[in-house]
Amino acid sequence: MNCREFRKHHLAFSDDALGEEMRVAMQLHLAECRSCDRYDTVIRRGLLAFRNLTPIETAPDFLDRLQAKLQQLEQADARAAIYRGPGLGSFIAVATSMLAAGFLAAALLDWTGPAQDIRFAPVVAMRPAAPPIAPPLDFDFVASASAGLPLWSAAMMAEQAPVHFATMEMGGR
């Protein structure tokens, strides 16, 4: 038996409500386990102290007052169960405030005024300037590409580069 099983069956053990086999197993575990032995001692001392307490005497009208209080609480619960939410007055107040907010927004933003035509500034279309004509391909630039780079991609890169980059920075003429 382990400690978990011992604590699970301890209540029946302390009430002598276990079968012979389980009771013997519980006693053997108590002899072997100090933790469960302390647990059993604390529980048995607590029960002994509880059993030796003097009985509490209630007032003669205690039961009548208790019944009246319980009945009062049941009626309050019944009233709370009937409550179905805000009343008609609350609904009217919310609707009126929403209407007032709508009218205020319409007045401030001038939504009720006549619609105005939108006029844009005139647009003048011009033909874009022709791109500068690139000088013929500089072979110094193409030759500087790495050996693994195909020739067409190097030529394409040279064509897309600005003219001054291809001629001045790369040592061209």
Image (cartoon, grey):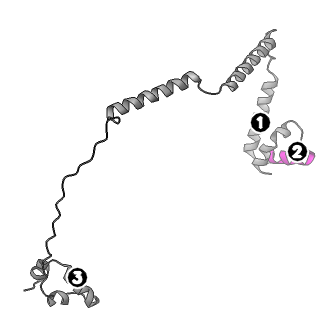
Is residue 57 in view from this perspective?
A: no
Quadrant of the rendered structure where residue 43 is?
Answer: top right
First in sequence, mark 1 or 3: give its number.
1
Label 1 amino acid? Thr
Residue marked by disc 1: 41
What is the three-letter code of the residue carrying label 2?
Arg
Mark 1 and mark 3 residues within 8 Å of each other at the beta carbon: no
Which amino acid type corresponds to the residue marked 3 in the rendered image?
Met
Q: Nearer the viewer, mark 1 or mark 3?
A: 3
Give the percent coordinates (x, y) of residue 25. 85, 48
Mark 3 = which residue?
A: 157
Name which quarter of the figure residue 108 lies in: top left
Residue 112 is drawn in which quadrant?
A: top left
Residue at x 67%, y 24% (from the top left corner): 80
Residue 54 pos. (x, y %) = 80, 17
Q: How many marks?
A: 3
22 is higher (above) or lower (below) than 52: below
Instruction: Mark 2 vs mark 3: give the one in front.
Output: 3
Secondary structure at numbered mark 3: helix
Determine the secondary structure under disc 2: helix
Q: Main secondary structure of the magenta part?
A: helix
Pointer 2 residue: 23
